[in-house]
Image (cartoon, grey):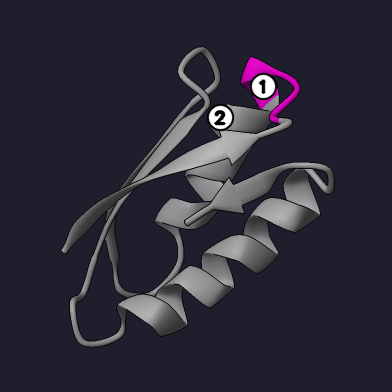
Amino acid sequence: MKKTFKLEDLDCANCAAKMERAIAKIDGVQSATVSFMAQKMIIEADDDKFEEIMEKVVKTCRKVEPDCRILR
């Protein structure tokens, strides 16, 4: 399953790159793209565990950029 999420308060391109690398390491994630310019995140992950994976993604993003919110 591939989903696109809007990001709010992502402050810099470096943080976006860190988030992208961290998300890509999560079990079940096939690909992750975080765009600072578009303020978007695209996640491709296993269908059956998508919600569980998204919980990990949210926690990972908060570690890198505490102010950034993922809008669903």
Amino acid at dot 1? Asn
33 drawn magenta: no
C-beta proximity under 8 Å, tags 2 and 1: yes
For residue 16, what is the image quadrant? top right
Residue at position x 62%, y 17% in the image: 13
Q: Please tell me which residue lies in front, 63 or 55.
A: 55
Query: If the image is split into quadrants, where does the N terminus sit?
Result: bottom left
- In the picture shown, does residue 51 fall above or below 36? below
Residue at image x 27%, y 53%?
A: 3
61 shown above or below 14: below
> Which residue is under mark 2?
17
Q: Main secondary structure of the magenta part?
A: loop
Q: Residue 33 location in percent, x, y?
A: 37, 36
Distance CA(mark 2)–CA(mark 1): 5 Å
When the figure is inspected, residue 16 is found, relative to residue 20, above or below; the finding is above
In magenta stretch: residue 13: yes
Q: Mark 1 — residue?
A: 14
* Residue 59 location (% of width, % of height): 68, 67
Give the farthest residue toward the top.
37
Q: Amino acid at mark 2?
A: Ala
**Going by the image, does 43 lie left or right of 66?**
left
Q: Which residues are magenta?
A: 10-14
SS type, badge 2 = helix
Q: Secondary structure at mark 1?
A: helix
User: In the rendering, at what x and y percent does residue 63 appear?
Assistant: 78, 56
On the image, which quarter does residue 42 sit in?
A: top left
